[in-house]
Image: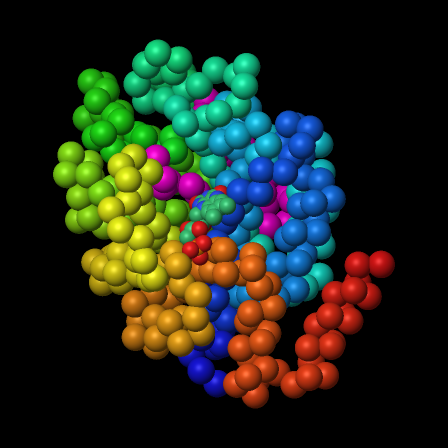
């Protein structure tokens, strides 16, 4: 058995291997209602069929102001929750751990006819009052409670990529003079505490490990934020990057060093993603302890059977087992 295919415990949850699917927006709520439809049912069960250790659902809005686009998912009204409950039950038939990324786009929201909120007032952005902040924290908690009721195994708070939580964290987007500007982690702390309390299960957070801007948070600042999250009950730091400035150079493995440094600085569990496409790369990252989990994004979209094929090559999966995975899935979907 190679380490990649050994199980791992994360916050009381056991995953069967160390390769997951990264959260990826599908932009396919055609009715602009945030409700999962046949496409989402097909898409996520197709990914689960490839037997990743875990699967993270795309950024899902925690309130009506949080959508990244008109066609993104939401988790705040009864129809959305009903459809997501069905989605979770489908994915669970394939025996993979399924989590949801709870997101708020903040001033990057692109929903037509809906106001935008952010830490600071701008042309078309409402600077959040203390009442707005308390309400949004409550909306994160409600979404976490809903995720528990839908049956998700874990939640991931989206604290990266220049969206609302990242906007509060970064000096590039938060120049508030009140306590949320004096302590730029205050909004994050309130959200994390509320989500940990409401979900009562494993909570991950995605952070941008490098803002690629000399005036932004430094890599060390972000490691301190990672440590803070672990202290508040987060069990895994999913280390991505960017959100405000252009990423200077993107090549294979371009974010792995950020996860590695985060892991060394915090001693917590970490995940990495970003142009990781080869089995040798994954095995090396895991074997050398640079990251506890490797997340695949576009690679898994291109080939959801990548892991099954790799296990087959290693002799960890016999031909009949491949058939059993298919058959079990198909049978249970009747
Ligand atoms: C189409 C697409 C949608 C994405 N949506 C999200 C998202 O909803 N949340 C998130 O944190 N990252 C999102 N990402 C970033 C991915 O999670 C991942 O970090 C990135 O694609 C790098 O991994 P890859 O090279 O394996 O694709 C998205 C990426 C793509 C390509």
Up the image or down, 182 lies above or below 286; here it is above
Q: Residue 267: which quarter of the image? A: bottom left
Q: Is residue 284 visible?
A: yes
Q: Is residue 286 visible?
A: no
Give how far across and how far down residue 204 sits, in percent: 42, 50
Image quarter where the C terminus lies is bottom right
Q: Image quadrant of residue 188?
A: top left
Number of numbered discs visible in the structure rendering? 0
Extreme bottom residue here?
A: 315
Towards the viewer: 133 or 6: 6
Position of residue 263 in the picture relative to residue 165 (left or right)? left
Give residue 284's position: percent from left, percent from top. Answer: 35, 75
Q: Residue furthest right?
A: 334
Does residue 55 appear left or right of residue 263 in this picture? right
Q: Position of residue 134 (x, y in %)?
A: 41, 23
Q: For residue 161: magenta?
A: yes
Q: Residue at x 38, y 30 (%)?
A: 164
Q: Residue furthest top?
A: 123
- Residue drawn where x is 55% and y is 79% of the image: 311
**Is residue 185 shown left or right of residue 272?**
left
Query: What colour scheme does the image use?
Result: rainbow
Residue drawn 36% across the image and 41% down it:
160
Measuring 42% from the left and 79% from the top, which residue is drawn there?
Answer: 3
Query: Residue 257, how many percent across, how many down?
Result: 25, 60
Which segment did they paint magenta? 135-162
**Residue 153 lies in magenta, yes or no?**
yes
């Amino acid at each position: 058995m190679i380490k990649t295919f050994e199980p791992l415990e994360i916050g009381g949850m056991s995953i069967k291997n160390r390769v997951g699917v990264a959260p990826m927006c599908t932009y396919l709520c055609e009715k602009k209602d945030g409700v999962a439809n046949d496409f989402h049912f097909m898409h996520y069960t197709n990914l689960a069929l490839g037997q990743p250790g875990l699967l993270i659902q795309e950024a899902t809005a925690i309130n009506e102001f949080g959508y990244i686009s008109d066609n993104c998912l939401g988790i705040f009204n009864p129809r959305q929750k009903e459809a997501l409950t069905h989605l979770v039950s489908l994915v669970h038939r394939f025996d993979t751990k399924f989590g949801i990324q709870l997101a708020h786009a903040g001033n990057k929201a692109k929903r037509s006819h809906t106001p935008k909120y952010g830490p600071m007032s701008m042309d078309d952005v409402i600077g959040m009052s203390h009442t707005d902040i308390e309400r949004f924290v409550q909306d994160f908690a409600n979404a976490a409670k809903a995720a528990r009721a839908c049956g998700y195994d874990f939640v991931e708070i989206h604290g990266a990529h220049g969206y609302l939580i990242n906007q509060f964290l970064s000096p590039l987007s938060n120049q508030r003079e009140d306590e949320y500007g004096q302590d730029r982690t205050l909004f994050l702390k309130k959200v994390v505490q509320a989500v940990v309390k409401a979900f009562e299960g494993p909570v991950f957070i995605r952070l941008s490990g490098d803002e690629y801007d000399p005036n932004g948070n430094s890599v060390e600042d972000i490691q301190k934020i990672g440590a803070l999250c672990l202290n508040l009950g987060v069990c895994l730091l999913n280390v991505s990057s960017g959100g405000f400035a252009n990423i200077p150079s993107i090549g294979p493995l371009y974010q792995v060093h950020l996860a590695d440094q985060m892991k060394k600085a915090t001693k917590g569990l970490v995940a990495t993603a970003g142009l990781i496409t080869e089995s040798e790369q994954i095995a090396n990252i895991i074997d050398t302890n640079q990251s506890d989990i490797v997340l695949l994004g576009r690679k898994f979209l291109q080939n959801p059977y990548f892991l099954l094929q790799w296990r087959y090559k290693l002799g960890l999966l016999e031909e009949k087992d491949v058939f059993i995975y298919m058959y079990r899935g198909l049978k249970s979907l009747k």
